[in-house]
Amino acid sequence: MNNKTPQKKNYPKGMALLEDPALNKGTAFTNEEREHFGLTGLLPDEVENIDRQVERVLGHLELKSNDLNPRSLGRPHLCPPCLTGLGQRL
């Protein structure tokens, strides 16, 4: 992730910007940047700097009971073989 503000010229906007890992600052985009780059409504309302984002992610990682428990964060684990039948009605 990049901590610098993207220049306002020649950069993608909206989802294209969020899909570029070199430019996406996540919740660190300021309200002004969100408006300029068409990100309003695409990110959580709270603006966090990069350091706060790192603290939040590390806090989530500390909650994991171990590396072998994919449900430790409350989400089911989807491995590639498990994805095969997702488009089918169960």
Image (tube, grey):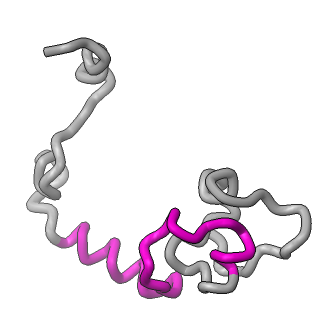
Q: Quadrant of residue 81?
A: top left
In this view, the residue in front, 48 or 21, is 48
Which residue occupies 90% across, 69% down? 9
Q: Is residue 45 left or right of residue 50?
A: left
Which residue occupies 72% across, 69% down? 37
Q: Position of residue 34 (x, y in %)?
A: 63, 75
Q: Position of residue 57 (x, y in %)?
A: 34, 72
Q: Quadrant of residue 22?
A: bottom right
Q: Is residue 44 left or right of residue 80?
A: right
In this view, the residue in front, 18 or 52, is 18
Above or below for 81 versus 8: above
Q: Is residue 26 left or right of residue 57?
A: right
Q: Quadrant of the C terminus?
A: top left
Which residue occupies 42% across, 86% down? 52
Above or below for 5 versus 89: below
Q: Is residue 76 left or right of residue 37?
A: left
Q: Position of residue 41 (x, y in %)?
A: 51, 67
Q: Position of residue 32 (x, y in %)?
A: 68, 85
Residue 79 in the magenta stretch? The answer is: no
Q: Quadrant of residue 70?
A: top left
Residue 54 in the magenta stretch? The answer is: yes
Identify the magenta region: 33-62
